[in-house]
């Protein structure tokens, strides 16, 4: 199922990986939506589920080329390269814009999700009572998750491993935001900010010949946390890919309807006009985490006033929709070539 044939295809696949990585970092946005809309979702799931006993035998027997071909290695390798680059570059840019231009960022993602709903729904014709019930269940779960209150941070390694399994589901299940689930678990900052920054700082120091981090207990703790989170993510990717490959093969209509429902439900999470609500103690004082930062409780959503800022935000929503339509156009063009 190798679809990466030209240099242009390879570059675009890395860019898609950048998009998935950036989407996975933003609460309320699913990297799986990027894969779905860009037209490589089924190949992504297919390639991941090829990581099985046969692939392990190739690896253990030293048949590395056979292993690489069997798991669609070029496709997965370029895609994950884009994701890794994203975590240390694009995601940092997103952090900046979320801090200073939050309304416009959320507006663009809101538009992208609306476009995603249109894209997935336009070719789905198998509407019956089962798929409609699945749609409603997906919407209900999506909305319900968006109104849950986050827990407090927990760096227990077994719990971190579990966080990795659950959070990576956003890559395989469109509409299910893994980063938002990490907020609910209380570990978003720990796993997607602090531990990633610790790895970046460690590499930067090692390049200059500085190995003093070995004596830094906090840095070592964060690196252990990131390692366990990564292992959980890999386990989750492989596990979810096998499950999804099965349900897509046997219950495709119900699964697609549920995915559409999840995405519709996630619109509440990315509604642009909202204020962050922070946790308070019984005395009404802010509760701070171990870094002295305010702990998010949830978001308070509201309808905007009609002013220039709102009009700009609406323009970004339209821009987000156009991005998805452009991705759809590229995906259809690529399919025709193949």
Image (tube, rainbow, N blue to C red):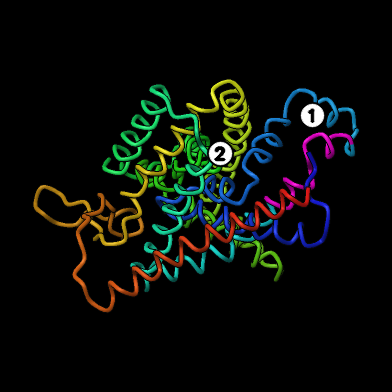
The residue at the point 74 percent across, 61 percent down is: 11
Residue 173 versus residue 204 in the image, above or below: above
Q: Residue 182 location, x and y as percent?
A: 41, 44
Numbered badge on residue 212? none
Kindly report the distance in space between the C-alpha atoms of the residues bearing marks 2 and 1.
20 Å
Residue 331 versus residue 41 in the image, above or below: below
Per the image, the residue denoted by label 1 is: 55
Q: Is residue 299 left or right of residue 56?
A: left
Q: Is residue 84 visible?
A: no
Tell which circle, 2 or 1, labels the residue nearer the N-terminal end.
1
Magenta-drawn segment: 66-79
Q: Is residue 53 visible?
A: yes
Q: How many marks?
A: 2
Q: Is residue 103 left or right of residue 159?
A: left
Direction bottom: furthest residue:
308
Task: Tell me the element at label 1.
Answer: helix
Q: Residues within 10 Å of mark 2 (few under 14, many from 20)?
A: many
Q: Residues within 10 Å of mark 1 (few under 14, many from 20)?
A: some
Give the quadrant of the N terminus: top right
Q: Residue 329 location, x and y as percent?
A: 61, 57
Per the image, the residue denoted by label 2 is: 172
Q: Residue 304 location, x and y as percent?
A: 21, 65
Task: Tell me the element at label 2.
Answer: helix
Most common secondary structure along the magenta stretch: helix
Q: Does 214 lie within the magenta span? A: no
């Amino acid at each position: 199922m190798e679809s990466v044939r030209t240099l242009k295809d390879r570059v675009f696949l890395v860019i898609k990986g950048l998009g998935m990585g950036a989407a996975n970092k933003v609460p309320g946005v699913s990297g799986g939506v990027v894969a779905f809309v860009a037209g490589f979702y089924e190949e992504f799931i297919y390639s991941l589920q090829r990581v099985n006993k046969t692939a392990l035998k190739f690896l253990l027997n030293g048949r590395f080329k056979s292993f690489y071909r069997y798991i669609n290695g070029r496709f997965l390798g370029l895609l994950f390269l884009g994701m890794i680059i994203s975590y240390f570059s694009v995601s940092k840019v997103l952090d900046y814009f979320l801090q200073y231009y939050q309304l416009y960022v959320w507006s663009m993602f809101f538009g992208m999700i609306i476009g995603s709903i249109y894209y997935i729904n336009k070719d789905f014709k198998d509407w019956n009572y089962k798929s409609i019930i699945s749609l409603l269940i997906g919407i209900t779960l999506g909305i319900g998750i968006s109104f849950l209150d986050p827990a407090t941070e927990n760096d227990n390694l077994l719990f971190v491993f579990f966080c990795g399994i659950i959070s990576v589901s956003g890559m395989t299940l469109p509409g299910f935001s893994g980063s938002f689930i990490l907020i609910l678990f209380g570990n978003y900052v720990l796993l997607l900010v602090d531990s990633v920054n610790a790895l970046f700082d460690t590499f930067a120091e090692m390049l200059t010949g500085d190995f003093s981090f070995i004596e830094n207990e906090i840095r070592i703790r964060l690196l252990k946390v990131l390692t366990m989170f990564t292992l959980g993510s890999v386990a989750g990717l492989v596990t979810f890919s096998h499950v999804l490959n099965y349900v897509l093969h046997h219950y495709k209509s119900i699964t697609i309807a549920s995915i559409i429902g999840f995405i519709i439900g996630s619109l509440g999470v990315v509604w642009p006009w909202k204020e962050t609500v922070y946790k308070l103690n019984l005395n009404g004082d802010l509760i701070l985490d171990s870094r002295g930062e305010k702990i998010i409780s949830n978001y308070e959503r509201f309808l905007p006033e009609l002013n220039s800022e709102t009009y700009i935000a609406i323009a970004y929503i339209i821009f987000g929709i156009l991005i998805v339509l452009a991705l759809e156009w590229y995906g259809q063009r690529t399919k025709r070539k193949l």
